[in-house]
Image: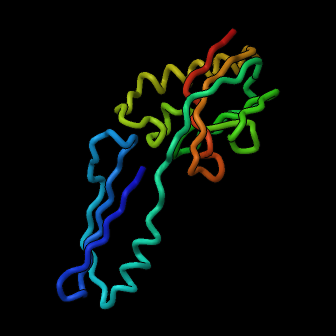
Amino acid sequence: MVFGLLALGEDRREAYVYLKWSHHANDRIQIIASRRIAFGYATGVCAFASSIAIAASFNAQVGASNVKIQSIFSGRYGPTYITFTSASLTGCYLGVGGYLSSTWPEAMLDVPADPEISKRQLSTVMLAKSMDATLTIYYRVNTSGTGWDKCAIDSIWIQ
């Protein structure tokens, strides 16, 4: 959950924007961004504050069985996107796919990025695709997502 705080300076010509992040209500809140901005009027500050993006927010993990990898997209930047055949991934974009969570920082929550986990998951994905293997996958729905970012694929089990 992202919390934003907007504080105006005494002369109303400066404003301070603070962003805080918390995954659960009980977690400690960490400041992830703090910025001093100068505007002539408070209306300009409000316009800036309204443009701040909302972070990803995930539901509990769910599973889907008897699926096969249909496609893998890996660009120069960003996470790897995977689509599945015979899939009914409820809540995911078009019900068929999501980002591989180990390659998507927003999906990793408080876990530091581990390149070895990403490599292992990507090699499992490639193996499953090359074998046309039947899989069980576990994923989480991002309630604030609007497209490919609707789901995070956490686990892939080759059966």
Across and down, in percent, residue 89 comes to 72, 33
Q: Name the foreground residue: 158 vs 59.
A: 59
In this rendering, the count of numbered labels is: 0
Q: Report which quarter residue 65 is drawn in.
A: top right
- Quarter of the image with the C terminus is top right
Across and down, in percent, residue 53 comes to 47, 61
Farthest residue to the right: give it. 86
Q: Name the foreground residue: 117 vs 5.
A: 5
Name above or below for residue 66 compared with residue 19. Answer: above
Residue pictured at 37% horizontal, 43% vertical: 25
Across and down, in percent, residue 19 comes to 33, 59
Residue pictured at 31% horizontal, 39% vertical: 27
Across and down, in percent, residue 98 comes to 64, 37
Residue pictured at 74% horizontal, 30% vertical: 84
Name above or below for residue 27 compared with residue 126. Answer: below
Q: Report which quarter residue 75 is drawn in.
A: top right
Type of colouring: rainbow
Farthest residue to the front: give it. 26
Q: Name the foreground residue: 97 vs 116.
A: 97
Residue pictured at 69% horizontal, 36% vertical: 97
Name above or below for residue 69 compared with residue 18. Answer: above
Q: Name the foreground residue: 27 vs 103.
A: 27
From the viewer's perspective, tell me whether residue 32 is left or right of residue 66.
left
Farthest residue to the top: give it. 159
From the viewer's perspective, tell me whether residue 14 is left or right of residue 46.
left
